[in-house]
Image: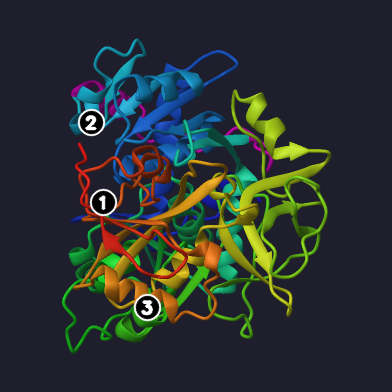
């Protein structure tokens, strides 16, 4: 099915469709809004490439415009409000935006950019919508392969790339997840993750649309506002990416936390220790999956999946040595590759070099590192850019991070490579502490970890108040790696082979 099909299925539904703050729309009214927005877009955009950018938080216009683009046969480009200046202009031009629609609060970010801009809160946009109110529901014919949205990657390893998101790429996960979790018109999907990112669209918005559930939107995620919102809207399903579970768990616990309607929380990249605790504290089932903006590979966890594992390798997926292309034996880190083809990957927009890097010899290369244990379960080991080569041995960062997070005083950990003066890399870790921890205590903890190899021991440890993150909560390791030990934060170092750390007293800028 297409997103257009999913919207048309709700065209005569007078049940609750969208809630935002104190406003609400039935599904019938929501679909009509999409038709009205489609009419405006048809009047403003022309030519073979009709792309409109949106620079906004999670507001109703975002939902109406996505549906409007489906009806009008245009493409919505999700722009990241945390991008600035030349970086934001680069994204707009890469995506061939003819027009950018923005909230008034974000309009100053577009100053000086030579692309037409309309304020979603302004009188001109209000007048255009009023002139198209009650437009006929006459969507263009769409196929599952038609482009509907461009979503930028997080940019943790370089400039963000615009991922082509087709109707199928948005509609299919919505249908699949709604069916998997038994969601229906009696449910409410809570949307607080940024809608310019794939997680909110494919694991949130499309899920609610496919189920005919109520979409409850929050402008921006708030840890303190999460549970009150769940109760206020009657939310039964919520999506997340990255650290939000940790942030909610950091709020003060109350005896009645589990007294709420939430049943399912679905997302990816949640901290392993937080998954069970979140479910216990809030009385819901947390499902953490493995996914990326690009698609190409998907995992399904089964009841026998061990903690920390992505699940068993899907058919056609293998862990391959990046240098030789051979299958890695159990326990050896390699790259996750879909040997059967591209999967759900529909390519990048205006970036043939990146397409060629992903698709080589009929195989989809994820750029993700992993290893398989002796029972066939797969474990994430970091990004290909996280690859460390220490004393001639290839290492991934994720297994080291999982071990560091076992210590109760370590709230967050990021492991990355810094150059070895002789050859290869040295392991460095940046830690956010939640309690007291001395270099000596840290060394004793590492020495007691039976699955931490000698080459995985961090040579340097940086103590930080917070880790640099993107707007979608992904850690920007390249910034940490570039700073190395040349920072003002405390650095612990290990000089020998033993787990003995001392505070470096060298003067740093």
Q: Nearer the viewer, residue 249 or 267?
A: 249
Q: Nearer the viewer, mark 2 or mark 3?
A: 3
Q: Image height check: is 151 above or below 206?
A: above
User: What secondary structure is marked by label 2?
Assistant: helix
Q: Position of residue 80 (x, y in %)?
A: 36, 36
Q: Position of residue 76 (x, y in %)?
A: 47, 33
Asked if labels 3 and 2 touch by Cβ distance under 8 angstroms, the answer is no
Numbered label attached to residue 349: none
The answer for how far apart the CA atoms under marks 2 and 3 are is 47 Å
User: What secondary structure is marked by label 1?
Assistant: loop
**Position of the C terminus by quadrant:** top left
SS majority, magenta: loop
Q: Image height check: is 72 above or below 4?
A: above
Q: Which residue position is annotated with label 3? A: 445
Q: Position of residue 292 (x, y in %)?
A: 55, 51
Q: Which residue position is annotated with label 2? A: 106
Q: Is residue 23 magenta?
A: no
Q: Mark 1 vs mark 3: which is more N-terminal?
A: 1
The answer for how far apart the CA atoms under marks 1 and 3 are is 38 Å
Q: Mark 1 vs mark 2: which is more N-terminal?
A: 2
The answer for how far apart the CA atoms under marks 1 and 2 are is 14 Å
Q: Position of residue 228 (x, y in %)?
A: 19, 70
Residues rendered magenta in the picture: 123-146
Is residue 66 toward the left or the right of residue 298 in the image?
left
Is residue 265 toward the left or the right of residue 289 in the image?
left
Q: Residue at x 21, y 40 (%)?
A: 508
Q: Mark 2 vs mark 3: which is more N-terminal?
A: 2
């Amino acid at each position: 099915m297409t997103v257009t099909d999913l919207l048309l299925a709700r065209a005569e539904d007078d049940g609750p469709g969208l809630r935002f703050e104190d406003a609400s729309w039935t599904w019938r009214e929501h679909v009509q809004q999409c038709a009205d927005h489609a009419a405006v877009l048809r009047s403003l955009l022309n030519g073979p490439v009709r792309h409109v950018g949106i620079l906004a938080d999670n507001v109703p216009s975002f939902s109406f415009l996505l549906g409007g683009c489906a009806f009008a046969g245009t493409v919505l480009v999700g722009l990241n409000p945390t991008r600035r200046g030349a970086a934001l202009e680069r994204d707009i031009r890469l995506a061939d935006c003819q027009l950018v629609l923005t909230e008034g609060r974000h309009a100053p970010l577009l100053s000086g950019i030579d692309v037409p801009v309309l304020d979603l809160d302004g009188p001109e946009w209000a007048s255009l919508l009023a002139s198209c109110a009650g437009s006929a529901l006459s969507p263009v014919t769409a196929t599952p392969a038609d482009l509907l949205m461009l979503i930028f990657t997080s940019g943790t390893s370089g400039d963000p790339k615009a991922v082509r998101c087709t109707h199928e790429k948005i509609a299919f996960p919505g249908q699949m997840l709604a069916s998997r979790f038994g969601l229906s018109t009696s449910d409410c999907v809570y949307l607080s993750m940024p809608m310019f990112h794939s997680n909110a669209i494919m694991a949130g918005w499309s899920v609610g649309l496919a189920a005919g559930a109520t979409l409850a939107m929050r402008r921006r995620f708030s840890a303190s506002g999460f549970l009150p919102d769940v109760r206020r809207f009657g939310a039964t399903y919520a999506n997340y990416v990255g650290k939000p579970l940790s942030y909610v768990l950091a709020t003060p616990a109350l005896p009645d936390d589990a007294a709420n309607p939430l049943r399912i929380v679905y997302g990816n990249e949640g901290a392993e220790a937080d998954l069970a605790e979140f479910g216990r504290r809030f009385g819901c089932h947390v499902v953490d999956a493995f996914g990326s903006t690009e698609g190409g590979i998907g995992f399904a966890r089964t009841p026998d999946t061990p903690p920390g594992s992505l699940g068993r390798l899907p058919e056609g997926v293998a862990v391959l040595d990046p240098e030789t292309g051979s299958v890695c034996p159990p326990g050896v880190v390699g790259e996750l590759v879909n040997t059967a083809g591209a999967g759900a990957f529909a390519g990048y927009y205006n970036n043939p070099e990146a397409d060629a890097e992903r698709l080589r010899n009929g195989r989809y290369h994820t750029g993700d590192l992993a290893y398989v244990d002796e029972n066939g379960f797969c474990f994430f080991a970091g990004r290909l850019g996280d690859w460390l080569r220490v004393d001639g041995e290839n290492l991934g960062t994720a297994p080291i991070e999982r071990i560091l997070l076992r210590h109760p005083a370590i709230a967050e950990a990021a492991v990355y490579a810094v150059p070895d003066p002789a050859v290869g890399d040295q392991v460095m870790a940046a830690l956010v502490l939640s309690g007291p921890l001395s270099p000596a205590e840290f060394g004793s903890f590492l020495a007691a970890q039976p699955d931490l190899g000698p080459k995985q021991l961090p040579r340097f440890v940086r103590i930080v108040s917070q880790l640099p993150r993107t707007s979608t909560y992904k850690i920007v390791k390249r910034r940490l790696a570039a700073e190395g030990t040349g920072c003002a934060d405390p650095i612990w170092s290990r000089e020998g082979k033993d787990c003995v750390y001392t505070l470096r007293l060298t003067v740093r800028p």
